[in-house]
Structures are given as C-alpha cells and as structure tokens.
Image (spheres, rainbow, N blue to C red):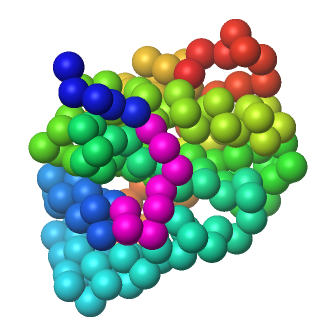
Amino acid sequence: MADVGVRPARRADAAAVTDIQVRAWREGYRDLLPAEALARVTEPDAVAVWRERWTEAAVAPPSARHRLLVAVSSELVVGFAATAPAEDPDLDPASAAELVTLLVDPLHGRAGHGSRLLAACVDLLREDGFGTVVCWVFEGDRVMRRFLESAGWAPDGARRVLDMGEPVAMIRMHTDISSEDARN
C-alpha cells in the first residue's frame, strides 16, 4: 500500500488543494448546483481567488483554531479538509467547530483518505477544546450525508437556502466529539 497520511497544509499545497476542489466540485456537484453557478465558481478567475485563499489558510489562518489539513498518498496531495470555530449565531464558537469543507480528489476516492481526514480533524478539534462539530451539506448530496452518517453524524434540524440563480437547500449535520469514545 502507498504511504498515506494527513498533515497540516503548506504554502506549496495551495495549487493541489485548489485543483482538487475544482475537480471534486465539477464531478460531485454537477447534479446538485445550477450549471451556471458551478461554472462561475470553477472558472479560471475564480480558481485564482481560491488558490490565494487556500495559500492564506495554510500560512496565515485567522486563528490557531482554524486548520487546513491535507491527505497525502506517496507525498501527493489527494484530499483536504478545513475546520474553524462555528460561526452560526445559534452556536457557541468556544465549544462548537465547523467542518468547513472536506474533499477528496475524485481520482483518489474510495481509498480511505476522507476517513483519515475526518479523524484527524476530530482529533485536532478535540485537542482545541471543541465538543461539537457541525458541517453544512447540500441537501441532495447523498454521498457526503452517508459518509458523515457512517461516522456518527446526524442532521440537527438547521437548514438554509443558497441563492445560486435558483434556490439550493442545505442542511446542517452535527456530531458530539466531547469524549474519546465519540465516533469519528
């Protein structure tokens, strides 16, 4: 088996993270988002902005509790995850975190990289003193919902609708990580 693992992202990873994001969005969201909206967020100008944002996230995060991790296989970046204190007004950012994103390159899917990323995120969030983690998921994203559910996550009843030229519903999922026994 290839040498696999998860580590903090570095400046040099920003291009790979951005490329993975674009590939994963184009493949995974093509049936979930309006085509025009998906094209807009994956066009070259948008890609340049994303690359700059991921570089910043790797080298100058807003706080020590903001993290960008990458999954690697034989030193190749194959996925990434970002976490931060929760920003939803009904959550306490001192004790609730958000899994902002978790994406694996479609070329490297179904190899455990997502599970390794999720476990590493939970470990770090628990070390940072968080007891709850939330994640906003497109309501129709059955793949991500099943993935999170298999790790012990569940919808918490919160919903929002994004205006992407047409309404796109999202649900918030959550999990309790307050103990070592919490599933991750």
* Nearer-the-camera pick, 127 or 47: 127
Kindly indicate the quadrant of the structure image that contains residue 18: bottom left
Q: Where does the image place residue 182, in percent across and percent down from the top left?
A: 67, 16
Up/down of 27 relative to 162, above or below = above
* Nearer-the-camera pick, 144 or 160: 144
- Which segment is the magenta one? 6-14
Q: Where does the image place residue 88, in percent across and percent down from the top left?
A: 72, 57
Q: Where does the image place residue 148, in percent across and percent down from the top left?
A: 46, 29
* Residue at point 28%, 79% (across, down): 47
Up/down of 162 relative to 138, above or below = below
Image-based side of 174 in relation to 22, left or right: right
* Residue at point 47%, 62% (across, down): 10
* Nearer-the-camera pick, 111 or 22: 111
Quadrant placement of the N terminus? top left
Kindly indicate the quadrant of the structure image that contains residue 32: bottom left
Looking at this rendering, what residue extends furthest in the bottom direction? 45
Instruction: Check if residue 12 falls in the magenta segment.
Output: yes
* Residue at point 58%, 38% (across, down): 121
Q: Where does the image place residue 39, in percent across and percent down from the top left?
A: 18, 76
The reply to whether residue 142 is visible in this rendering is no
* Residue at point 30%, 70% (across, down): 15
The reply to whether residue 106 is visible in this rendering is yes
Kindly indicate the quadrant of the structure image that contains residue 162: bottom left
* Nearer-the-camera pick, 137 or 2: 2
